[in-house]
Amino acid sequence: MKKSMYGKFGGQFVPEVLMPALTELEEAYERYKDDREFLKELDYYMKEFAGRETPLYFAKNLSEKYGIKIYLKREDLVHGGAHKLNNTLGQALLAKYMGKKRLIAETGAGQHGTATAMAAANMGFESEVYMGAKDVIRQHMNVYRMELMGTKVNAVESGSKTLKDAINEAFRDWVTNVENTHYLIGSVVGSHPYPMIVRDFQSVIGKEVKDQIMEKEGRYPDSIIACAGGGSNAMGIFYPFIEDKEVKLFPVEAGGKEMRTTEKEALHSASLCVGEEGILQGAHTLILQDKYGQILESSSISAGLDYSGVGPELAYLADIGRITPCYANDDEALEAFYELSRLEGIIPALESSHAIAYLMKMAKMGKLGELGDLVVINLSGRGDKDLETVFKLKEEESKEDCL
């Protein structure tokens, strides 16, 4: 089995002009991933700049309400407000060691773009970020944050004007400027070695959880829940537990708006749940497509989960039954957004709200026992960026109630 594959998933389906860049990246990563000086510098950035390690917080009020022990891995406390900085610091440092002068990136909710801007400003890179025009509007504060740190933000008007289209434009830029530019992919998607590299840099989440939960509870959790769009925060917390078969792993995708005529029609961004095999942005994975193989537009209240595919390693883990794909719809995520805010004084990102929502959904269905007595939820980001979206939805609901 080739290193570039996860079972039948993965691979390198890119234009020939990009193959030397992928080879250069893989060789550099293999050279530096265990290099003492590289790891020492990365550890410095992780601790002193990003603020690691993050707490594993016992959600006392949430636990009392649902009758089980619930811990939150507080990635919302990473500098910038999300887990994304773990990866951007690692890749930016790798690019620096490779002699690159410019960083480009794609972003959906703006958290990866913001994290790229932070790493670029700190390490002295020129940087540009591609963002779907729809996401630029609903996440304009993150756009301002990126621009504030010297990053140029390009609004992508093609296609669905969301994350998939932003990735396409970033690839076009990379093809043109491959000699001096590193494409800093933000999730466990794309061609090898990207899914592996992003997973490894994000695995700091799961490694910390292993030590923290043993210190607090003397055992591993029964279940770990994480939201999943492309899948970086999910793979980051899942990966160190893959061989621990007693730990159940639940990636929660975006189900979009309320249920329609069929489940497949309703699950607008749930590639693991209803996707089919296909090629998307350089990898063989599970994607949302029609009978002719055309990519379907995704739709979610959460910009970071608004993606038509999923990382190939997650597709593989679902295929072999190691993870249990599930979903939460927009209304359920909103309910969870309010629930955590009111019970714990923690405002979660709408992406992370999907993970909270799945626990709440299981409780409503009387299936909470399937999660066990000890659950860890990856709180991948904070909700500051989503307050305007939630406020607008609340206003719309109020108007409808008056009609």
Image (spheres, rainbow, N blue to C red):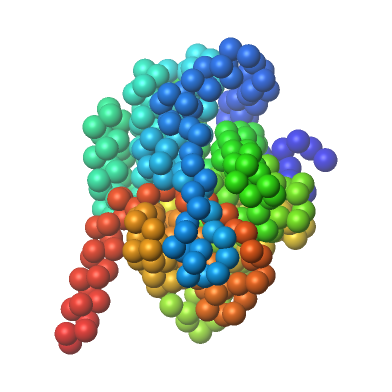
Q: How many marks?
A: 0
Going 26% across and 34% down the picture, which residue do you hit? 147
Of residues 378 and 269, the one nearer the viewer is 378
Going 52% across and 28% down the picture, which residue do you hit? 91
Is 210 on the left-hand or right-hand side of 389?
Answer: right
* Residue 1 percent across, percent down from the top left: 83, 40
Going 75% across and 49% down the picture, which residue do you hit? 244
Q: Is residue 2 above or below residue 348?
A: above
Is 239 on the left-hand or right-hand side of 205?
Answer: right
Query: In the rendered image, which quarter is residue 398 located in?
Result: bottom left
* Residue 237 percent across, percent down from the top left: 60, 46
Q: Quadrant of the C terminus?
A: bottom left
Q: Is residue 52 above or below residue 59?
A: above
Is 72 on the left-hand or right-hand side of 349?
Answer: right
Of residues 14 and 75, the one nearer the viewer is 75
Query: In the rendered image, which quarter is residue 177 located in?
Result: top left
* Residue 276 percent across, percent down from the top left: 64, 63
Q: Is residue 21 above or below residue 163?
A: above
- Can you see residue 24? no
* Residue 90 percent across, percent down from the top left: 52, 27
